[in-house]
Image: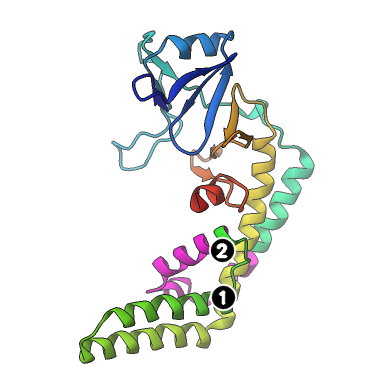
Amino acid sequence: MGSKKDNTIHREGNKISQRENLIKYSYPASSDEGKALNHAKISLALHTRIDKPEREYNIDTSKLKSHPDVHIFDQKFSRPDSRHHTDDQAEFEKHFNNASKSFDKIRDHDGLVEGHTDHLQTYINKTVRTGESPNASGYKKHLAERLQKEVDKVKMPKTNALKKEHMDNMVHDVEDNKEQFNHLFAGHRHLEKARNVLLKSLESSPTKQEQTINGKETKPEGFVVSYNDNSARKVVNRSKEGFSGQNLNK
């Protein structure tokens, strides 16, 4: 999260802040949290354990000894602290069910995305930056432009022809399966809407610190949500105005 040595922990008037990436986290300097951060040399956010087959998000830090030189950023809060009301739950279920219906229309999901996974991820990130809604036509255009650049890089005629053939096959694949890709993107949009309902509840919950990006108030970077079956999922604001969108556009 930050350190005194590189000035990512520093005092500004009546606040003390720490900043590691895009978001600056601040506390009143007179608060208990602010005093602890002010005395510390480094600040850590302990959120993920990766020495097991499955990543562990809600890690147990109870056995760690406290030390005034180390400030532990407390990022946890429990269900009673969140504001996920009955109406929010119903809206979440509606969008989640609509996503399931869209995905059920895909004949062979693995076959559809084979060879497209990296390109789909890049395209989705691009739409986050631009604020567009992903769809098959937009993806086809993105794919053609991206693969054409790969073709243009190659001067050897034989290799160039192979690259061109690969590009044509990929673009034709999207065109031939346009309806299936649109079901994929529709499911993605419904999942985004479900996630946004959950985000609204989580982001409206009280936090111990103030979050800003370039001096403007913002929401937290994201959340990890634990479910009753012990599974966990990251929930990040992927809108153009959210952390992910601003981070991609910085």
Above or below, comparing residue 43 to residue 160 in the picture: above
Q: Which residues are magenta?
A: 100-128
Q: Is residue 100 left or right of residue 93?
A: left
* Quadrant of the image containing the N terminus: top left
Residue occupied by mark 2:
127
Above or below, comparing residue 103 to residue 191 in the picture: below
Near-viewer residue (29 or 65): 29
Q: Is residue 105 visible?
A: no
Q: Quadrant of residue 146?
A: bottom left
Instruction: Tell me the crowding category of disc 2: few under 14, some 14 to 19, or many 20 or more residues within 10 angstroms, Cα based.
Output: some
Q: Is residue 135 left or right of residue 3?
A: right
Near-viewer residue (70 or 230): 70
Residue at 38% over, 10% down: 66
Circles 2 and 1, Cβ within 8 Å, touching? The answer is yes
Above or below, comparing residue 171 to residue 105 in the picture: below
**Percent of width and height locating residue 29:** 56, 12
Residue at 67% over, 55% down: 193
Residue occupied by mark 1:
138
Instruction: Confirm whether the magenta stretch covers residue 124.
Output: yes
Rounded to the nearest angstrom, the CA distance separating label 2 from label 1 is 9 Å
Above or below, comparing residue 196 to residue 179 in the picture: above
State the mark number for residue 36: none
Instruction: Confirm whether the magenta stretch covers residue 200.
Output: no
Residue at 45% over, 81% down: 144
**Percent of width and height locating residue 108:** 48, 75
Residue at 38% over, 84% down: 167
Under mark 2, the amino acid is: Thr
Disc 2 element = helix
